[in-house]
């Protein structure tokens, strides 16, 4: 028997074994996907309960509970502008049972703002779909002596460092919205970071801080009740939920625009069939009329998309906000 014949038999045998192993792997992956989900799913929210990220996660989680046939619960891991929750989600088992409600802060701003990141927003996560975009709303405690953007700018320049603006945390969209406003208007505003929108809002309602550039879902109820004074929205166009509130751009700061967005992620190594199943379920519930209505009532717009569309969007947003952070001079350890 020639060496070629022996080698050929060995090669054919190895190929056959590989084919069997591959079929087994594919079979187990398919079986895993078919069995998924077989237990409750957790959505890690990187901010305190009561804020916009939490509100949207609970709306989506409730709808997914019905769609997937398993409980979907929210786990709030607040701190470091969303980085604590992001790190926990990135290190979670990639089995589809731990998801992450990311934001423009965790996935497009923090990497430029923080000198050290506990996770890589691109490499450590698999994007599933955006959930919603929302305007930020500039609101003031009623005791403040201004009602418009121009009056606020004049007051801030006459009283440097006196106006304090709260945010859900350093690097969060409301924080960067404030930094952008400060750099474009030449005003001296003092940033006060919190571990979520809810505790910041509590202090604003109590008069401990002056203003907030808050996500609209967290602030709109207090505007409607008269407890807070709306000054302007941060988007290029007015909000349909508050049509009488002008934009910052039309109020004397041309070119100003900042929009918050929120999206669902899974740990990067989650099996492709599970990711596909999750995307399908998320897109389906986001297109349900009752879910759209709930998000619209919070001042948000639903965005349901493919993972590829979401990934391309994140790439563009990262480039945009990297420039804003650099121009603002903001930096955090």
Image: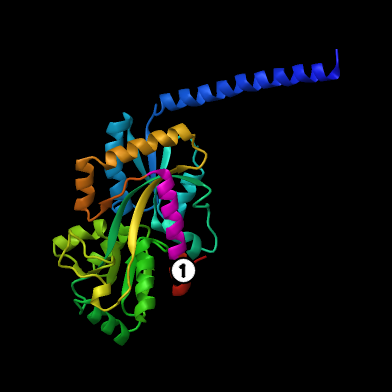
Of 27 and 159, the residue lying toward us: 27
Of 194 and 285, the residue lying toward us: 285
Residue at 20%, 68% in the rendered image: 230
Residue 147 vertical placement versus 4 (above, below): below
Q: Position of residue 255 (x, y in %)?
A: 33, 73
Does the magenta stretch mainly form a helix, a strand or a loop?
helix
Q: Position of residue 61 (x, y in %)?
A: 31, 40
Q: Please tell me in which quadrant of the rendered image residue 134 appears.
A: bottom left
Q: Which residue is mark 1?
A: 323
Judged from the image, the secondary structure of the residue bearing numbered disc 1 is helix
Residue at 53%, 25% in the rendered image: 26
Q: Position of residue 56 (x, y in %)?
A: 29, 48
Residue 113 falls left or right of residue 54: right
Residue 80 visible within the image: no
Q: Position of residue 308 (x, y in %)?
A: 43, 46
Q: Check if residue 312 falls in the magenta segment.
A: yes
Residue 247 falls left or right of residue 109: left
Residue at 21%, 51% in the rendered image: 296
Question: Residue farthest to the top?
Answer: 1
Of 52 and 294, the residue lying toward us: 294
Question: Residue farthest to the bottom?
Answer: 158
Q: Residues within 10 Å of mark 1 (few under 14, many from 20)?
A: few
Considering the image in quadrants, where does the N terminus appear? top right
Residue 323 falls left or right of residue 251: right
Residue 212 vertical placement versus 30 (above, below): below
Bounds of the magenta segment: 306-321
Residue 268 visible within the image: yes
Q: Check if residue 95 falls in the magenta segment.
A: no
């Amino acid at each position: 028997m020639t060496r070629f014949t022996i080698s050929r038999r060995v090669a054919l045998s190895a190929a056959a074994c590989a084919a069997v192993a591959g079929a087994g792997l594919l079979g187990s992956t398919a079986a895993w996907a078919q069995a998924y989900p077989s237990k409750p799913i957790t959505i890690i929210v990187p901010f305190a309960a009561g804020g916009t990220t939490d509100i949207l996660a609970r709306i989506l989680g409730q709808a997914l509970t019905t769609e997937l046939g398993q409980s979907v619960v929210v786990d709030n891991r607040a701190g470091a502008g969303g980085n604590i929750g992001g790190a926990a989600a990135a290190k979670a088992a990639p089995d589809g049972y731990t998801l992450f409600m990311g934001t423009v802060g965790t996935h497009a701003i923090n990497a430029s703002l923080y000198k050290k990141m506990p996770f890589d927003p691109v490499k450590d996560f698999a994007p599933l779909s955006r959930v919603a975009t929302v305007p930020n709303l500039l609101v003031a405690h009623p005791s403040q002596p201004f009602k418009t953007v121009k009056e606020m700018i004049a007051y801030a320049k006459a009283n440097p460092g006196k106006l304090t603006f709260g945010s859900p945390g350093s690097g969060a969209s409301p924080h960067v919205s404030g930094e952008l406003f400060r750099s474009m208007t030449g005003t001296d505003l003092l940033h006060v970071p919190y571990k979520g929108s809810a505790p910041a809002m509590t202090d604003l309602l109590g008069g401990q801080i002056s203003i907030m550039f808050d996500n609209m879902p967290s602030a709109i109820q207090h505007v409607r009740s008269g407890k807070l004074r709306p000054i302007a929205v941060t988007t290029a166009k007015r909000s349909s939920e508050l049509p009488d509130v002008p934009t910052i751009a039309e109020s004397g700061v041309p070119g100003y625009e900042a929009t918050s967005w929120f999206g669902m992620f899974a740990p990067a190594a989650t099996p492709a069939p599970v990711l596909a199943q999750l995307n399908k379920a998320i897109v389906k519930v986001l297109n349900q009329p009752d879910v759209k209505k709930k998000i619209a009532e919070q001042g948000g717009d639903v965005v349901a998309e493919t993972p590829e569309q979401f990934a391309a969007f994140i790439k563009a947003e990262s480039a945009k906000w990297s420039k804003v952070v650099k121009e603002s001079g903001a930096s955090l350890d």
